[in-house]
Amino acid sequence: TSVVYGNFFIVDPVTDFSPETYTAHANYESSGVVTYGTGHKIFNNHFQNLTGGRTSKHRVPVGIGAGDTDATTGNDHQRSRGVVVCHNTFANCQYGIGVGLNYKLPPQDCIVANNLLSGTGVMAFRMSPNAETDKTCQYQNNLAWITGSAVYGTEKPLIKSDPLLQPTSFKGHTLDLPGPNSPAVNGSTGSHVADDVFGSARSGTP
């Protein structure tokens, strides 16, 4: 079981996705976290400008991996089970969350909740057919907003609303964060996480 929280995955934006220019860019197929196995938690992370997924479908910012086995021998891919992905922000990434990619056994009993996906260039949720039809995983209160020719990529429940992100200076970086009028403010549900992405305690309405 791994716990991944409080990280900032920030790279320079890509504006030209022509094959020759894109493959030469330092941000070519930049990605984040992928899970296999049981009980991992990914929360309170900020992913910004990542391009992974355009060429290699498993290199999305967060991937909840499908598997080729239920019991690993160390040289295979155990399906994700009981993974929690919550309170993450995906700003201006080409893809957001991938579920069940690459292998045949879809994730089971996972929770994907209170994530914010904004400015997605291609697809907010990249779901395998098996993951899309799976009934064991829960998708709760995820706020998503696509731009241009992008698609949401799933029929799972989503809140489709502009989160009104605005550039905010933080420790020498510019982050796209919810502004004061964002529907994300006081908008989460459940009690999956006690602290916010900056390490401050969540109190009252999350």
Image (cartoon, rainbow, N blue to C red):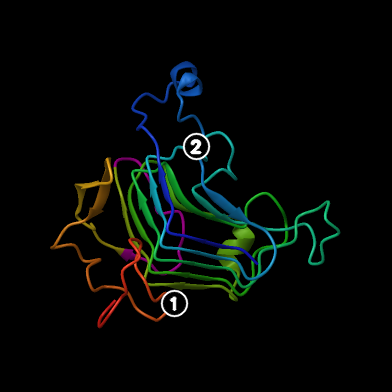
Look at the image and say whether residue 153 sits in the magenta stretch: yes
Q: Is residue 151 visible?
A: no
Question: Residue lying furthest left in this view?
Answer: 181
Residue indicated by mark 2: 30
Identify the residue under disc 1: 192
Residue at the farthest top position: 20
Image quadrant containing the N terminus: bottom right
Quarter residue 196 falls in: bottom left
**Kind of residue at badge 1:** His
- The front one of 138 and 33 is 33
- What amino acid is found at the position of numbered circle 2 in the picture? Ser
Q: Is residue 24 visible?
A: yes
Q: Main secondary structure of the magenta part?
A: loop
Residue at 48% over, 16% down: 20
Q: Say left or right for 60 vs 204.
A: right
In the figure, is residue 188 to the left or right of 38?
A: left
Q: Residue 148, labelled with which disc? A: none
User: Could you tell which of marks 1 and 2 lies nearer the N-terminus?
Assistant: 2
Magenta segment: 148-159
* Residue neighbourhood size for the residue with mark 1, other residues' Cα within 10 Å, grouped as few (<14), some (14–19), many (≥20): some
Near mark 2 (Cα within 10 A), the count class, few <14, some 14-19 or many ≥20, is many
Pinpoint residue 150: horizontal percent, then vertical percent.
37, 44
Q: SS for tag 2?
A: loop
